[in-house]
Image: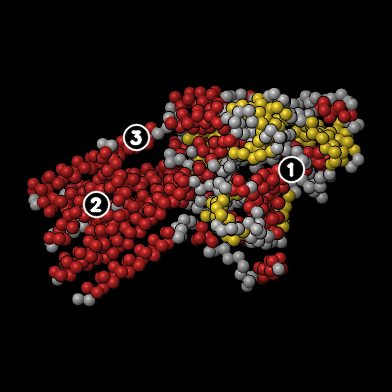
Amino acid sequence: MRILYLLIPMALGVVGVALWGFLWAVRTGQFDDLEGSAHRILMDDDDPRIPHYRAEAKEDKSLSE
Amino acid sequence: MPVVPEAIAPEPPATAETACFHCGLPVPAGTRYATVIDDQRQPMCCHGCEAVAEAIVAAGLTDFYRHRTAPSHRAEDLIPKQLRGLALYDRPDLQKSFVRAESEHIREAALILEGIVCAACVWLNERHVGRLPGVLEFRVNYSTHRARLRWDERQIKLSDILIAIAAIGYIAHPFDPNRQEALQKRERAVALRRLAVAGLGSMQVMMLAVGLYAGEYQGMEEWIRELLRWTCLILTVPVVTYSAQSFYRAAWRDLRRRQLGMDVPVALAIVAAFAASVWYTGKGGGEVYYDSVTMFVFFLLTGRFLEMTARHRAAQISEALVRMLPAIATRLNAADEEEIVPIAELAPGDRVLVRPGETIPADGSVIEGASSVDESLLTGESQPVPRQRGAALIGGAVNVDSPLVMRVEKVGADTVLSAISRLLDRAQSEKPRLALLADRIAGGFVAALLAVAAVVLAAWWSLSDFDTAFRVTLSVLVVSCPCALSLATPTAMVAATGALTRLGVLTTRGHALETLAQATHVIFDKTGTLTFGRPRVAAVETVGGLETRRGLALAAALERGSEHPVGRALVEAAGESIPSATDIRNTPGNGIEGWIEGRRYRIGRPEFVAALSQTAATERDDLDAASTWVALGDETRLLAWFRLTDALRPDAAIAVAALRARGLTVELLSGDRPDAVTHTAREAGIATATGGMSPQDKLERLRALQQRGTVVAMVGDGVNDAPVLAAAQVSLAMGNGTQLAHASADMILLSERLEHLVDGVDMARRTLTITRENFAWAIGYNLIALPLAAGGWLTPWMSAIGMSFSSLLVVVNALRLRRL
């Protein structure tokens, strides 16, 4: 069981890393909008497999060119 | 072939079968606005919605309609003047207050977006604006409806971006994120950090605690036990010293004020449990409570965090509405040159140019020009009042027909507007008795709790040793933590407020829902609340066989350039195919003359129109109080009559009926002419209506009702209502109301749909029920758990679990409110 002398400090280290990660996320504003991102990911609008979009995507391209 | 004529006949009630595809409002029968979306012709209710839908289709963003979960706001026609107003934002002196220069050409600004109802709106805005050349970044925050915009000023102007946003039906206002907002952001970040430390700490400690408990039963080598305890201590130190700081501070503040708040027993339990644990860890025996302490702190912080989020959001909303536009005025200097200055810089004696559609910046008098001004915000009078040279102008009124030059006489605190706002301040300061009551009850509860804990400690100490007595007392303090009690209300409020916000009903005060649920009376204001607040064409009567559509088209051609509400109503009613008119001359107060297809026409007051054909003016004898008649004629005769009326909102009657079905007494108080008020009341189905009331009269009527013990909900719009709104137990403002009304109202109907008022009442009543359930649970739980803990049957960790289970139940129950 002496391994605990190694494992427990390691666990503390992991906690430290997790905490640092979380604080970093807070600092970079990732908790500013908790609702928007959940919706944003659902709207992928330019899926080229849907025929309807292909036409639109082409239009877009021709517009930007 | 489309038919307009009958169309315009009385504003159809909400029974119309078709709803506007864009905004969901009923389509007035006979109008023919439509847009082809995804190969399907979709009906539109007005020109504004149609234009917006077309812009969305043209940008290839029709997915918006598939993704959105709520109908959009009704799009108002943007008048060219407003668009020109946006160009003001390009001025460097004005930009100073809200634009940050990132590098030489990169600019950054914060915007408030009006009209965001669902996540699809965010998507639409980000896609549409993000595609503009020169826009580097455009991110919309769905929770706060604010956006961060970065752009390259060499490629695009700020006003062009704002116009692009307007084209898809949203309104963007630049705003200056001020100190209070920065403060909130910091508070939130600190709270999140504390929560994270407590969360991670409590999880680790709990894991080790399981080992310790298992060791108690199965036996554990001494050195392992020591190791685990010391590790727990290390993990608990940051939780107790950093995360729990806010509790110590609040408890200390309470004690210094000789009060007992919820935080006193909390701080006591944390400090005592931690001190005892450290002592026993050092001594190498006895019981440790690290798990209870960290869990306790974590759960309490979670509750506080939820509450803080709700509070911040409420503050942001009301603040956004007050400080939406930088207040500016056009001042004329000695050489008659125009200069744009902030209103704060105006001084008595300054000459100010007020263009049609602009707001009069200060009190003063007309020195050049003649126009009519809309004082409906101040007096409730729905028709614009003529103002000639020398006439007095009130700051806050809107200039309607033609440019005016005014001399500023009173500024700042001396103006009528600030007098009203002082009245409002006073009315608001009469409120917070309810909050004091809640504090007293909490204080009593905590005092009783501390007394019980002291008795328990003394009793156990005398019966057995100090260790046991301490353990039992700690269980009592933890188990009876008024956590569920303090979570009961805020969580229910957050959930209900969130659900209502999605509907477009904003709650800006904590007490609003509670009071609304108990309301017995609903008092409506008329102009802008039950009605649209601006005239619409209600009927067209042609003389001598002129086609109705032609009549409207001629009228619209003359009125096209007009800013007068009557003119805009005619243009809106005519739709497309308006012929072009030349040589247009505006005679303020009388009407407009112009040439169309080689003939001279006049529109306006009957005498003015009759003067052109030199016939006798005919007066309308069927003049009803709520409407205005406008005549159209050419050089030979009178051609048509248009009846314009400030139409009732289509859902007004439904909403009033629904409110009455819920047992509420509905009343109408208005500053408008009594006959007009009676007319509106009859249409909306309101039995009690009083017109011609000054703000003071309204306030007295309200007080009289309140003295009879009724709870009054006031639904209003406009500055003149503000004192009345504040004096009512709960107040609601329509979203298009003035900024001041927003700031003083407890709830805001951003959707401008009266039906949502009914939803608000329903939601408020459900919230009250759930809050009561939560209270019943929290008190019942304490009644059972406290004797158990005092009897020594509970260990501190059981207490902590019991307490958190109780809180969790309360939270889950409250979250049921998220569904409408």
The Cα atoms of the two marked residues, 2 and 3, are separated by 27 Å
In the rendered image, which residue does mark 3 sit on?
A: B437
- The chain carrying label 3 is B
Q: Which residue is label 2 attached to?
A: B270
Marks 1, 2: nearer the viewer: 2
**Residue B115 in sight from this viewpoint:** no
The answer to whether dots 1 and 3 both sit on one chain is yes
Residue B563 appearing in the image: yes
Q: Residues within 10 Å of mark 2 (few under 14, many from 20)?
A: many
Q: Chain of mark 1?
A: B
The image position of residue B12, as x and y in percent, is 69, 40
Find the distance from the CA under tag 1 to the CA under tag 2: 67 Å
Q: Where residue A24 sits: x, y (%)? A: 41, 62
Chain of the residue that carries numbered disc 2 in the rendered image: B
* Residue assigned mark 1: B572
Q: Which residue is more in the foreground, B101 or B495?
A: B101
Q: Earlier in the sequence, mark 1 or mark 2?
A: 2
Q: What x and y, as percent, mark residue B70? A: 58, 52
On screen, residue B590 versus residue B676, left or right, reads right
First in residue order: circle 1 vs circle 3: 3
Residue B542, quarter of the rendered image: top right
Which label's residue is closer to the chain start, 2 or 3? 2
Dot 1: within a 10 Å radius of its alpha carbon, few (fewer than 14), some, or many (20 or more) residues?
Answer: some
Side (left or right) of B251 relative to B752: left
